[in-house]
């Protein structure tokens, strides 16, 4: 867990930096693990140059090669950054990374190609996600009642029809 004081220190150090200046600083700090993942990315408010005093610095690791990488990072840089492993993130957070990342380390075309699969999954699912939203509680209740009624009709099958004689 990143404490507010650590986040505030990060902000004070980074508040006057744009994303490119911050990436230069991050390259120095993460050089020791540059070959331990397919990519190391900056994402979130700092990547978009919209950070404020409450912002943390979000770092994402793409396909780490070792299981102890987070421990190594924490030992070296402490809790100064909010570090996530891309493959462990929920899809909607993956999309946040995909839509606004900046490469700290890694091959941009290779990273983009790897992320394409996740972008495609999101596009395939997006209409389902947005289509399943209810505008009001009444919409939700009405839809649920219709679903339950349909379910009852489908699941009700008289068992003894073959015993009836004509």
Image (spheres, grey):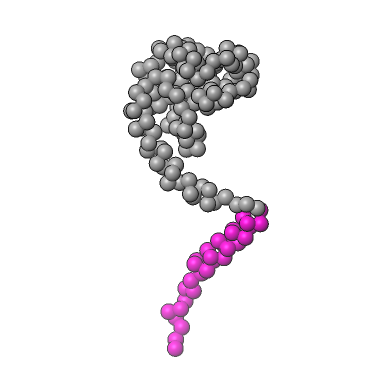
Image: 27 above or below 46:
above
Image: 124 above or below 15:
below
Image: 72 above or below 100:
above
Residue 130: x %, y % from top left: 53, 48
Does residue 162 belong to the magenta stretch? yes
Q: Nearer the viewer, residue 109 or 94?
A: 109
**For the image shown, how many numbered marks are present on the structure?**
0
Q: In the displayed structure, does residue 31 sit left or right of residue 74?
A: left
Q: Residue at x 46, y 83 (%)?
A: 164
What is the magenta segment's predominant secondary structure? helix
Residue 80: x %, y % from top left: 54, 16
Q: In the displayed structure, does residue 61 sit left or right of residue 49?
A: left
What residue span does the magenta drawing correspond to?
A: 137-166
Looking at the rendered image, the quarter that the C terminus falls into is bottom left
Q: Nearer the viewer, residue 32 or 111?
A: 111
Q: Nearer the viewer, residue 64 or 159?
A: 64
């Amino acid at each position: 867990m990143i404490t507010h004081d650590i986040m505030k220190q990060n902000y004070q150090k980074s508040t006057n930096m744009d994303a490119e200046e911050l990436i230069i600083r991050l390259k120095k700090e993460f050089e020791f693990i540059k070959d331990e993942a397919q990519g190391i990315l900056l994402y979130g408010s700092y990547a978009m140059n919209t950070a404020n005093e409450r912002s943390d610095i979000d770092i994402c690791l793409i396909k780490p090669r070792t299981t102890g990488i987070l421990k190594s990072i924490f030992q070296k840089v402490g809790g100064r950054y909010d570090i996530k492993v891309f493959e462990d993130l929920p899809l909607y957070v993956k999309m946040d990374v995909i839509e606004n990342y900046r490469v700290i380390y890694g091959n941009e075309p290779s990273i983009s190609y790897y992320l394409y699969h996740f972008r495609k999954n999101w596009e395939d699912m997006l209409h389902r996600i947005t289509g399943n939203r209810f505008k009001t509680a009444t919409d939700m209740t009405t839809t649920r009642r219709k679903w339950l009624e349909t379910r009852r009709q489908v699941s009700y099958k008289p068992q003894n029809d073959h015993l009836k004689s004509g």
